[in-house]
Image (cartoon, grey):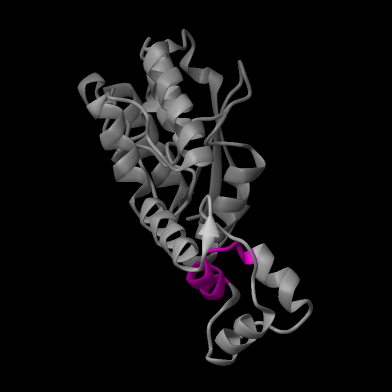
């Protein structure tokens, strides 16, 4: 019985699926049975298999034997990154210890829980034949990054952005309020007191905490304090 990391390669295009197992031979048998039955947990690999005229074009190989599970997780991530198995392969999750095998249904395309990033969300709309929606989401992301505001009236996009950016929005509002109370114009303090920054640092605040309290950037604090150590 071999333990470790294995690779399933589509020899027609070079794309791969990376996996780990305590019993690799058994795992390969399970993969073949699930693919033949049409219910493999990786919808990407299943779609690949279904499209192949010659099923033997899927090549299975052991790439490294690893005894312990915690080490297998690390090694699996290494090979997933090496072969780009998530972005340009058949793994359904970017991370070895966080599988995401469920393919969103068309009616669930707007459900943010399926996506690890804005890029995935936009790609989903593009692939679903909704380029206008993809373009509007991209526009609102850029607009939010520049102004901190959402300018669309589309309740679906508003809901998505609020759901995915709650923490960031709250933090931006907090920093804006801090900058206003610090005597700013246009949301930015006109000047910063190095002595005040040192006092806050001496109280145990981190550079990021100081920036948030004063309504400035962390980089501004770093420049003001120079090479002084951060607590």
Q: Residue at x 38, y 9 (%)?
A: 129
- Residue 199 appears at what percent x and percent y? 59, 89
Residue 103: tell me if it is visible: no
Q: Residue furthest right?
A: 227
For the image shown, how many numbered marks are present on the structure? 0
| Frontmost residue, 32 versus 117 | 117
Q: Is residue 162 above or below residue 136?
A: below
- Residue 53 appears at what percent x and percent y? 46, 7
Q: Residue at x 45, y 57 (%)?
A: 176
Q: Residue furthest bottom?
A: 202
Q: Is residue 129 left or right of residue 109?
A: right
Q: Residue furthest left?
A: 107
Q: Is residue 107 left or right of residue 122?
A: left
| Frontmost residue, 72 versus 181 | 181
- Residue 6 appears at what percent x and percent y? 54, 44
Q: Is residue 55 above or below residue 217?
A: above
Residue 26: tell me if it is visible: yes
The span shown in magenta is: 208-218
Q: Residue at x 62, y 62 (%)?
A: 190
| Frontmost residue, 112 versus 22 | 112
Q: Look at the image and say whether residue 228 sits in the magenta stretch.
A: no
- Residue 71 appears at what percent x and percent y? 54, 65
Q: Look at the image and say whether residue 217 sits in the magenta stretch.
A: yes
Which image quarter is the C terminus in? bottom right
Q: Is residue 141 above or below residue 229?
A: above
Q: Quadrant of residue 109?
A: top left
Q: Quadrant of residue 122?
A: top left
- The main secondary structure of the magenta stretch is helix
């Amino acid at each position: 019985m071999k333990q470790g990391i294995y690779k399933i390669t589509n020899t027609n295009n070079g794309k791969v699926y990376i996996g780990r197992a305590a019993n690799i031979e058994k795992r390969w048998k399970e993969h073949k049975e699930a693919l033949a039955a049409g219910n493999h947990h990786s919808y990407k690999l299943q779609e690949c298999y279904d499209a192949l005229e010659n099923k033997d074009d899927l090549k299975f190989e052991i790439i490294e034997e690893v005894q312990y599970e915690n080490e297998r997780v690390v090694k699996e991530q290494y090979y997933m990154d090496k072969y780009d198995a998530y972005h340009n392969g058949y793994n359904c999750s970017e991370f070895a210890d966080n599988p995401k095998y469920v393919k969103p249904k068309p009616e669930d395309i707007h459900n943010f829980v399926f996506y690890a990033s804005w890029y995935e969300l936009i790609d989903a709309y593009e692939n679903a034949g909704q380029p206008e929606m993809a373009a509007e989401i991209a526009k609102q992301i850029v607009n939010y990054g520049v102004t901190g505001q959402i300018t669309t009236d589309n309740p679906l996009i508003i809901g998505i952005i609020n759901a995915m950016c709650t923490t960031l929005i709250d933090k931006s509002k907090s920093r804006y309020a801090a900058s206003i109370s610090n005597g700013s114009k246009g949301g930015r303090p006109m000047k910063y007191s190095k002595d005040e920054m040192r006092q806050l640092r001496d109280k145990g605040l981190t550079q990021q905490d100081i920036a948030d309290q004063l309504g400035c950037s962390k980089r501004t604090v770093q420049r003001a304090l120079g090479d002084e150590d951060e607590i």
